[in-house]
Image (tube, rainbow, N blue to C red):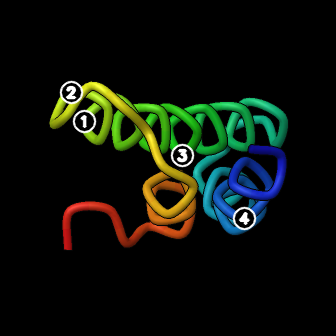
Amino acid sequence: MGAVFAAAAIPNVGVGAALGVDAWRSALMAGAIAVLEVLRRIAEAYRADGKLTADELEDAVSGEAGQ
């Protein structure tokens, strides 16, 4: 989840700076949204059949869930 957080947070720091938002706030919001999206995908995979496989977890983290 740390990599998901960092991958989403880093690009948003520059945008936030351009808009006058503190870097830490931009990073926190973007990273939190990315992590919550992964958790949503995991919950949907579990809800589908009541179990999670390694492939479903990998798909959720890589962004391939539901495709």
Measure how far apart labels 3 and 4 are at the Cα level: 9 Å
- The alpha-carbon separation of the residues under discs 2 and 3 comes to 20 Å
Check whether the beta carbons of the residues at disc 2 and disc 3 lie within 8 A of each other.
Answer: no
Distance (Cα) linking label 2 and label 4: 27 Å
Determine whether 34 is above or below 47 in the image: below
Q: Which of marks 2 and 4 is nearer the N terminus?
A: 4
Q: Which of marks 1 and 4 is nearer the N terminus?
A: 4
Could you tell which of marks 1 and 3 lies nearer the N-terminus?
3
Disc 1 and disc 4: Cα gap in Å?
A: 22 Å
Q: How crowded is mark 1: few (under 14 residues within 10 Å), some or many (20 or more)?
A: some
- Judging from the image, what secondary structure is the residue with disc 2 in? helix
Q: Mark 3 points at which residue?
A: 34
- State which quarter of the image contains the C terminus: bottom left
Whether residues under marks 2 and 1 lie with C-beta atoms below 8 angstroms apart, the answer is yes
Q: Which amino acid does label 2 sit on?
A: Arg
Numbered disc 1: secondary structure: helix
Q: Nearer the viewer, mark 2 or mark 4?
A: 2
Residue to which mark 2 is pinned = 47
Left or right of 31 in this view: 22: right
Residue 15, image x and y in percent? 62, 62
